[in-house]
Image: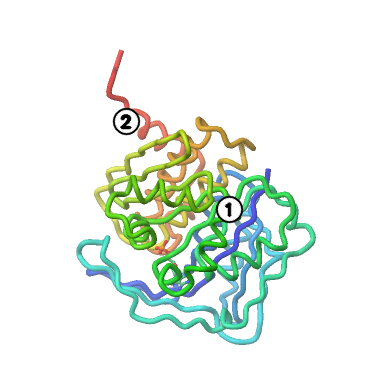
């Protein structure tokens, strides 16, 4: 089965304490789309300006991402500039320029409307709702969000929660959103707001998956060299949705595996800036790391 993805498409400038790179391919939808493409056909809904480099369009095409839903309009592509501290969980946004996003009205091509699996990557919840309104018969909808929308667009976000199957967010966002210090209470509260499942990501400490009568805790892969954490969460959710689409089922067993595939792809992504590492990644590499996750979490051998 195929998946639809919408979210931001950006030209990023990313600074760590050791390196800085400009005009990188970024945006939640870019990371999610390429991550999902290891598992299924991805159909992208988004917007870029005329300055968007051809080489990035070629990169999507190399991963067989369908671009019929991509608008290329006069103006400049969305830009984000961020800086990481030595502790890479700490990130500061130095500047954001919405540019073409200011007047974005997502339009789904007819061929996209019945796609069964959907990942609404991080973007204003009003736009996520606008995309959902054009979908017919989606089987499973995953949504991501960020602190900015929790602060400035709480009502549309709560409306979105009533319409999606799974919300993915990081631990600080989960606490901020629910006003709970305990992540367990936060996860439960999110479920009360609508979705059947919630995933709380804890960066280098793994993630928690909550369902009504279901709980799963996944470790993170113990990486020594993290070059650029940007987009890890988007890769996680893109790969998770892509894996569910490839299996065309959403039972607890498949969800647990999807969380591990998501964690594996995210762990590769942080090994290089932008989507650099995913360019050379193979499905075999992903399977190998999936097996290492399995070994790492088994505690009763024999
Ligand atoms: P993450 O590391 O998962 O938070 O995602 C990073 C990506 O989010 C970057 O590539 C940015 O271009 C993109 N981004 C930053 N700010 C926003 C925003 N306000 N809306 C949508 N995407 C954003």
Which of 193 and 233 lies nearest the eye of the viewer?
193
Residue at (50, 64) in percent of width and height:
122
Q: What residue would you read off at disc 1?
A: 164
User: Residue under circle 2?
Assistant: 297
In the structure shown, which secondary structural element does the residue marked by tag 1 occupy?
loop
Q: Would you call the spot at circle 2 few (<14 residues within 10 Å), some (14-19), or many (20 or more)?
A: few
Discs 2, 1 touching: Cβ within 8 Å: no
Quadrant position of residue 107: bottom right
Mark 1 nearby-residue class (10 Å; few <14, some 14–19, many ≥20): many
Q: Quadrant of the C terminus?
A: top left
Q: Give the distance between the C-alpha atoms of the residues marked 2 and 1, in whole angstroms.
A: 30 Å
Disc 2 vs disc 1: which is toward the camera?
A: 1
Percent coordinates x, y for residue 192 in the rendering: 48, 49
Foreground residue, 56 or 290? 290
Badge 2 or badge 1: first in the primary sequence: 1
The part of the image, by quadrant, that contains residue 245 is top right
User: x, y (%) of residue 180?
Assistant: 31, 55
Please state which of residues 53 and 228 is positioned toward the viewer in this rendering: 228
Question: Residue 223 vs residue 251: left or right?
Answer: left
Tell me the quadrant of the picture where the N terminus can be found.
top right
Relative to 154, does residue 263 appear above or below in the rendering? above
Q: Position of residue 146 (x, y in %)?
A: 42, 65
């Amino acid at each position: 089965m195929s998946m639809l993805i919408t979210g931001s498409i950006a030209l990023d400038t990313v600074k760590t304490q050791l390196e800085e790179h400009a005009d990188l391919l970024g945006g939640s939808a870019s990371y999610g789309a390429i991550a999902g493409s290891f598992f299924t056909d991805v159909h992208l809904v988004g917007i870029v300006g005329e300055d968007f480099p051809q080489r990035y369009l070629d990169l999507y095409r190399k991963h067989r991402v369908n671009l019929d839903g991509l608008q290329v309009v006069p103006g400049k592509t969305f830009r984000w500039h961020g800086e990481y501290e030595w502790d890479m969980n700490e990130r500061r946004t130095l500047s954001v320029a919405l540019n073409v996003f200011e007047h974005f009205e997502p339009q789904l091509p007819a061929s996209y409307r019945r796609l069964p699996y959907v990942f609404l990557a991080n973007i204003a919840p009003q736009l996520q709702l606008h995309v959902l309104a054009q979908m017919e018969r989606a089987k499973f909808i995953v949504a991501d969000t960020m602190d900015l929308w929790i602060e400035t667009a709480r009502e549309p976000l709560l409306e979105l929660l009533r319409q999606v199957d799974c919300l993915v967010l990081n631990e600080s966002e989960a606490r901020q959103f629910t006003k709970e210090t305990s992540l367990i209470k936060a996860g439960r509260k999110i479920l009360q707001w609508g979705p059947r499942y919630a995933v709380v990501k804890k960066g280098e400490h793994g993630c928690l998956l909550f369902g009504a009568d279901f709980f799963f805790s996944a470790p993170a892969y113990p990486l020594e060299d993290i070059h650029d954490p940007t987009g890890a969460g988007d890769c996680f959710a893109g790969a998770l949705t892509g894996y569910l689409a490839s299996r065309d089922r959403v039972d607890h067993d498949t969800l647990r595996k999807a969380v591990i595939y998501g964690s594996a792809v995210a762990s590769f992504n942080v090994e290089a800036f932008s989507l650099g590492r995913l360019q050379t990644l193979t499905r075999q590499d992903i399977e190998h790391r999936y097996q290492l996750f399995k070994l790492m979490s088994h505690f009763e051998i024999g």
